[in-house]
Image: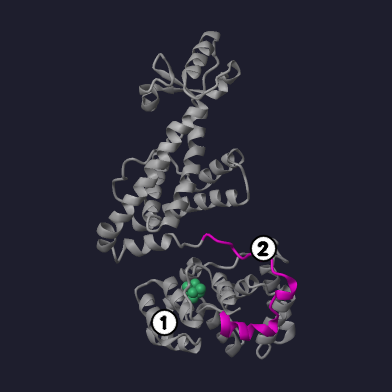
């Protein structure tokens, strides 16, 4: 069936669960971020177009066309809220949404193309209309079946009213070029205006009333992690850390989750399965080469794990993380979202300490990391309110003495920002 394409004039209504709200927005963000990546790679719009539609299919699907439509509308409006607060955010959203709209619009038009009976008579009429348009140097060659669309006339009232299209039997024949100026540009203008209005309304009306529930989620959306996955960092060989650097790096630049794991491993010479996974992928993400990883784990575990046992029981897992065994997948270090959502059992130390530690343990752990006292209190407060990544960003700031503009979304990102700040 023909994809429904909304101009997003009306706000969505009906009930929506908060986690659905968030999930829809994240899925749309993945599409928009993908569009941005394509542009960064230098693709022209016509090269991007099929990829944009693919991205949209991949992330914005739904079982029925109603579901797809609902997700489309809701996610669009949530991102308006999340990206209305500053000029930069508005500009970013506008650019990606316009490209998405244009690609989907062209796709919709592809279904509306002038059908086979493209008669000589019709060609004549279309040529006459084209020639009557100011600023258009029409030639017969411009009038081909695939440069025109046949659209129910009520879909293009602006064009009909200004007599810039040929009308026949309830259909308007519209050239591809006109479509852009008459539909895409108004879309951009309307969205741009809506974002400014939303920014004002959000601050005055919505955010104060939703300070506990919606507001933090919406605000964090624009900082949500969609960045590199750190699975295969291109680090120069001479910049890669060695096993012997890990204790120092843990003190200087590990986020609390990883510093905690390092301490536990160093003290007990052992980590349980989930912890080993979380920690060794992080270490891979900071660029520790496989041979150094083997050396590091072997040394740390040596007091309780004889070499043969290590080789037999643990080497495989480490090589596996590096894609050297088993399915040879290059495993991806965990994001904060993933770590925060895993709850350690008794005697386990994985997960996010901002979520799993009580206030007292959190205070002393942050003290050991040498976070400034004021920032420790800020982090403890944020953690108590359930904002773990904000707490982590506060700790980062309290450790490095500068502001952490990007927020914390990934332990490896924490690490990289830290190395940058320290240099
Ligand atoms: Fe680790 Fe992320 Fe939690 Fe910070 S917020 S401690 S980086 S999981």
Determine if the C-beta at disc 2 is less than 8 A from ligand 1.
no
Question: Quadrant where the C terminus lies?
Answer: bottom right
Helix, strand or loop under label 2: loop
Q: As drawn, which residue projects farthest toward the top?
A: 121
Q: Nearer the viewer, residue 239 or 260?
A: 239
Q: Position of residue 384 (x, y in %)?
A: 35, 77
- Judge the density around disc 2: few (<14), some (14-19), many (≥20) Cα neighbours within 10 Å: some
- Per the image, is 244 magenta? yes
Q: As drawn, which residue projects farthest toward the front?
A: 135
Q: Earlier in the sequence, mark 1 or mark 2?
A: 2
Q: Measured along the vertical axis of the image, is residue 266 above or below residue 140? A: below
Q: Is residue 268 rendered to the left or right of residue 242?
A: left
For the point 44% across and 48% down, the residue is: 94
Q: Which residues are magenta?
A: 226-253
Q: Position of residue 234 (x, y in %)?
A: 69, 65
Q: Nearer the viewer, mark 1 or mark 2?
A: 1
Quarter of the image holding residue 301? bottom right
Quarter of the image holding residue 190? top left
- Judge the density around disc 1: few (<14), some (14-19), many (≥20) Cα neighbours within 10 Å: many
Residue indicated by mark 2: 330
On residue 375, which mark appears? 1
- Per the image, is 282 magenta? no
């Amino acid at each position: 069936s023909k994809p429904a394409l909304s101009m997003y004039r009306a706000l969505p209504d009906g009930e929506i669960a908060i986690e659905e709200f968030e999930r829809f927005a994240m899925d749309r963000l993945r599409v928009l971020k993908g569009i941005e990546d394509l542009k960064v790679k230098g693709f022209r719009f016509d090269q991007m177009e099929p990829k944009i539609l693919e991205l949209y299919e991949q992330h914005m699907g739904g079982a029925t066309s109603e579901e797809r439509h609902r997700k489309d509308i809701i996610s669009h409006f949530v991102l308006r809220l999340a990206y209305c607060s500053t000029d930069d955010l508005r500009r970013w959203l506008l650019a990606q949404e316009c490209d998405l709209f244009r690609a989907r619009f062209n796709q919709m038009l592809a279904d509306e193309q002038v059908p086979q009976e493209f008669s000589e008579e019709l060609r004549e009429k279309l040529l006459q209309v084209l020639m009557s348009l100011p600023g258009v140097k029409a030639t017969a060659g411009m009038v081909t079946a695939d440069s025109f669309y046949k659209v129910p006339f009520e879909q293009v009232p602006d064009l009909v009213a200004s007599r810039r299209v040929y009308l026949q039997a309830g259909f308007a024949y519209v050239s591809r070029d006109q479509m852009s100026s008459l539909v895409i540009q108004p879309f951009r203008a309307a969205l741009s205006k809506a974002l400014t209005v939303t920014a004002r309304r959000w601050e005055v009306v919505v955010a104060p009333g939703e300070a506990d529930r919606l507001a933090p989620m919406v605000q964090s959306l624009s900082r949500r992690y969609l960045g590199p996955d750190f699975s295969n960092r291109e680090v120069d060989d001479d910049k890669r850390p060695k096993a012997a650097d890990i204790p120092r790096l843990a003190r200087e630049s590990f986020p609390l989750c990883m510093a905690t794991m390092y301490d536990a491993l160093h003290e007990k010479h052992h980590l349980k399965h989930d912890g080993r996974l979380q920690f060794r992928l992080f270490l891979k993400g900071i660029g520790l080469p496989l041979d150094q990883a083997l050396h590091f784990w072997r040394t740390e575990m040596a007091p309780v794990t004889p070499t043969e046992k290590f080789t037999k029981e643990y080497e495989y897992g480490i090589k596996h993380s590096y894609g050297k065994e088993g399915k040879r997948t290059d495993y991806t270090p965990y994001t904060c979202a993933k770590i925060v959502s895993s709850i350690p059992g008794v005697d386990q130390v994985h997960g996010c300490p901002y979520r799993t530690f009580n206030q007292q343990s959190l205070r002393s752990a942050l003290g050991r990391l040498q976070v400034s006292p004021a920032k420790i209190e800020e982090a403890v407060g944020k953690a108590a309110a359930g904002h773990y990544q904000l707490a982590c960003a506060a700790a980062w700031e309290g450790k490095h003495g500068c502001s952490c503009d990007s927020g914390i979304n990934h332990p490896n990102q924490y690490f990289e920002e830290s190395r940058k700040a320290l240099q």
